[in-house]
Image (tube, rainbow, N blue to C red):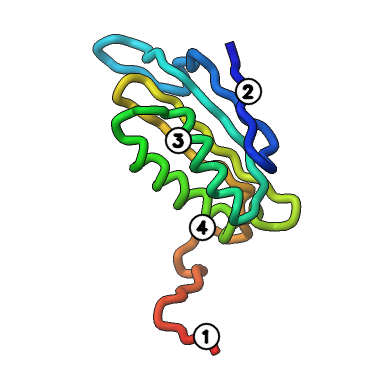
Amino acid sequence: MPIALSAPDSVAGSVLDEASPEALGTDDAIGPRRGRYCVGTFGGRREQVGQARAFLAAFLGDWARVDDAVLLIGELGANAVVHTGSGEPGGLFTVRAALAGPWLRAEVEDQGSSWSGRLEDAECQIGRAHV
C-alpha cells in the first residue's frame, strides 16, 4: 500500500511497502528480492537537494548505511541541479530507491544536458581562475 510523503516544494513522493522484482534485481541463489521502494520528484533548485536527502533518510530510517546513501544522493542531486536541464526554470529531478535487507539501489534521474558524451567535448574547470 503506498504511503504519500510530502516535502516543501516537492512535486511528488511515495513509498511502497513492496518493491517490484525489476526495481530490486534478482539474487541468483534465492530469485527475486523483496523489499521496499520509494520515489520522489523535486524542483530543480539547490535547496531541493536537501529535501531529497531528507526524503531518502526518512525512507531508510535506521538502515545501517543511511548516512552514506544520503551523502551520495545529495551529490547526485546537486550534479543534476548544477549540470543538467533539471536546474533550468521549471526543471525537476527524481530520486528512486529500492531497499531489500542489506541491499540498496538508489538513483537520481535528471533532465539531461546538451553534452554529447564525448570526453573531448567536455570543458575542464581545473586550474581556471575566475576573475
Label 3: which residue? 57
Mark 2: few, some, or many residues within 10 Å (few <14, many ≥20)? few
- Mark 2 and mark 4: span between their CA atoms? 36 Å
**Residue 16 drawn above or below residue 10:** above
* Residue located at (59% from left, 34% from top): 40
Which amino acid, by three-letter code, is at mark 4?
Gly
Label 1: which residue? 130
Tell me the quarter of the picture where residue 12 sits. Answer: top right
Tell me which numbered mark, 3 or 2, is placed earlier along the sequence.
2
- Mark 3 and mark 2: span between their CA atoms? 15 Å
Tell me which numbered mark, 1 or 2, is placed earlier along the sequence.
2
Label 2: which residue? 4
- Mark 1 and mark 2: span between their CA atoms? 44 Å
| Res 117 label | 4
* Residue located at (35% from left, 41% from top): 67
- Mark 1 and mark 4: span between their CA atoms? 25 Å
Would you say 11 lies left or right of 17 here? Answer: right
Which amino acid, by three-letter code, is at mark 2?
Ala
Give the residue furthest to the left. Answer: 29
* Residue located at (35% from left, 18% from top): 26
Q: Position of residue 102 (x, y in %)?
A: 29, 24
